[in-house]
Image (spheres, rainbow, N blue to C red):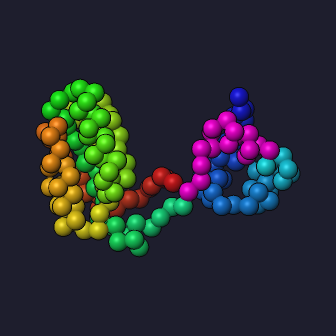
Amino acid sequence: MTKFDQINQHILRELSRDGRISNLELAERVGLSPSACLRRVQDLERAGVISGYRAVLNRQALGLGFVTYIGVGLGEHSKDAQQAFETAMLGAPEVVECHNITGTIEYLLRVECADLQSYKRFHTEILGTSPYVTAITTYVVMDSTKDLRG
């Protein structure tokens, strides 16, 4: 089990900010020798605390600046209904997050499209054709003052 002392927490903070930071720079920022820092990072990776590294994409530059969160209610609360819905969402490139949640609805989606017209097409052709969907509530993102997803 990897220890979660202040140095490991500092390493994780720095890597969350910049996953491409060199080991030398990371070691300087957290106050370790490069070899000790590398050992700790490798321990965190082996323990599954660090599960990967990825590029953060500028969705606006990719033409995907229309972002919505969508609450989806299912009419049937069975395992088959959930699996069918989840499979449909896995096949929809507009859906970048799909969360099964508790409360008055079953799913919360993050959907990224080029514009309102492409969202309408997703709404009609993907969500609207799912036999289990009985409620759709859309929240359009106007601005994001804090977004720490990596």
Q: Residue at x 37, y 53 (%)?
A: 96
Residue 105: image location, x then y, percent: 23, 35
Which corner quadrant holds the N terminus?
Answer: top right
Going by the picture, which residue comes out furthest to the top?
78
Left or right? Give the position of 21 relative to 24.
left
Residue 103 visible within the image: no
User: Is 8 part of what is drawn in magenta?
Assistant: no
Left or right? Give the position of 146 relative to 49.
left
Instruction: Indicate the quadrant where residue 72 lies.
Output: top left
Q: Residue at x 24, y 52 (%)?
A: 139
Residue 117: image location, x then y, percent: 18, 67
Q: The magenta stretch spans which residues?
A: 39-54
User: Is 51 part of what is drawn in magenta?
Assistant: yes
Residue 27 visible within the image: yes
Instruction: Indicate the quadrant where residue 19 lies.
Output: bottom right
Q: Residue at x 22, y 65 (%)?
A: 118
Front one among 139 and 46? 46
Residue 94: image location, x then y, percent: 31, 57
Q: Residue at x 19, y 49 (%)?
A: 127
